[in-house]
């Protein structure tokens, strides 16, 4: 587990970038994230259970986002739940062009593929093929994509479609690396109960969601 000083040193570069981009990004729209790697601490009901590493890579107008999630839940020193996800997304602007995900959920292997096709997003998942509107995005986008209405999200691990209502963004100050930063907060309701906070740079810095078992899962930038 990282010490508070090491977490502070890793988080501080994000704060500097976020503040530097604030003037150019404006209060309404953020530029796509630059090449960088960020890591999140995942907690369930206050206990650390895993990590989420995200790598952003730009190539012209396209952005690739690579996720690696590792979760372990132990009960009385025995592993009760294990979860690993490896996912790669390709974006152009705020539209998802493609996604490939491999997940091991407590021993069950799941694969999902999605690609943009005209005004639709075609998804191949363990329970069969399905289509979603072109504006559909994964259930926790790692960069700001809420400049247009989003009524459909989908779970990257199994392709399940989620009917959602996303609130208008509100400003909330969060402490990041020892600095107070004015972030944009959106709440998601419907098939997903979540709150997402984004730095002025457009990068997700905090996510809180209610799991199906009623527990609270929090992801925080380290």
Image (cartoon, rainbow, N blue to C red):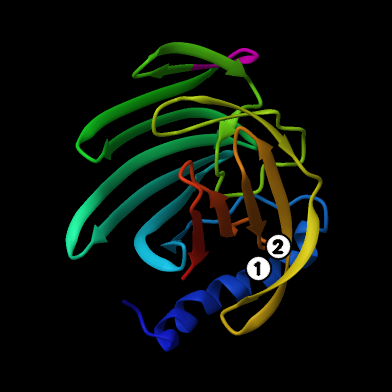
Residues at discs 1 and 2 in contact (Cβ within 8 Å):
yes
Extreme bottom residue here? Answer: 5
Q: Which residues are magenta?
A: 117-122
* Dominant secondary structure (helix, strand or loop) of the stretch shown in magenta: strand
Q: Nearer the viewer, residue 66 or 156?
A: 156
- Mark 1 residue crowding within 10 angstroms, few (<14) / some (14–19) / many (20+): many
Q: Could you tell me which residue is drawn at 66 percent across and 63 percent down?
A: 199
Q: Could you tell me which residue is drawn at 39 percent across and 57 percent down?
A: 53
Which structural element holds mark 2?
Answer: loop
On screen, residue 137 versus residue 157, left or right, reads: right
User: Which quadrant of the rendered structure holds the N terminus?
Assistant: bottom left
**Location of residue 95 with respect to 142 vertically, above or below:** above
Query: What x and y, as percent, mark residue 81?
Result: 26, 49
Label 2: which residue? 200
Name which quarter of the figure residue 103 lies in: top left
The mark nearer the N terminus, 1 or 2, is 1
Q: CA distance from mark 1 to mark 2?
A: 5 Å
**Location of residue 4 with respect to 194 vertically, above or below:** below
Label 1: which residue? 18
**Location of residue 209 with respect to 127 vertically, above or below:** below
């Amino acid at each position: 587990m990282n010490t508070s000083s090491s977490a502070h040193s890793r988080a501080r570069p994000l704060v500097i970038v976020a503040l530097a981009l604030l003037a150019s990004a404006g209060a309404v729209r953020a530029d796509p994230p630059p090449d960088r790697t960020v890591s999140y601490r995942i907690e369930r009901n206050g206990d650390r259970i895993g990590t989420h590493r995200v790598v952003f890579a730009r190539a012209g107008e396209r952005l690739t986002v690579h996720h690696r999630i590792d979760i372990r839940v132990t009960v009385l020193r025995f592993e009760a739940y294990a979860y690993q996800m490896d996912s790669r997304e390709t974006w152009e602007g705020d539209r998802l062009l493609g996604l490939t995900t491999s997940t091991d959920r407590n021993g069950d292997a799941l694969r999902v593929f999605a690609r943009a096709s005209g005004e639709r997003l075609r998804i191949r998942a363990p329970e069969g093929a399905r289509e979603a509107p072109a504006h559909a995005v994964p259930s926790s986008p790692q960069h700001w994509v809420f400049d247009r209405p989003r009524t459909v999200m989908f779970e990257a691990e199994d392709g399940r479609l989620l009917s959602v209502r996303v609130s208008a963004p509100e400003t909330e100050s969060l402490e990041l690396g020892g600095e107070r930063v004015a972030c944009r907060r959106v709440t998601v309701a419907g098939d997903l109960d979540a709150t997402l906070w984004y730095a002025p740079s457009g990068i997700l810095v905090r996510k809180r969601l209610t799991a199906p078992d009623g527990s609270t899962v929090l992801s925080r930038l380290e």
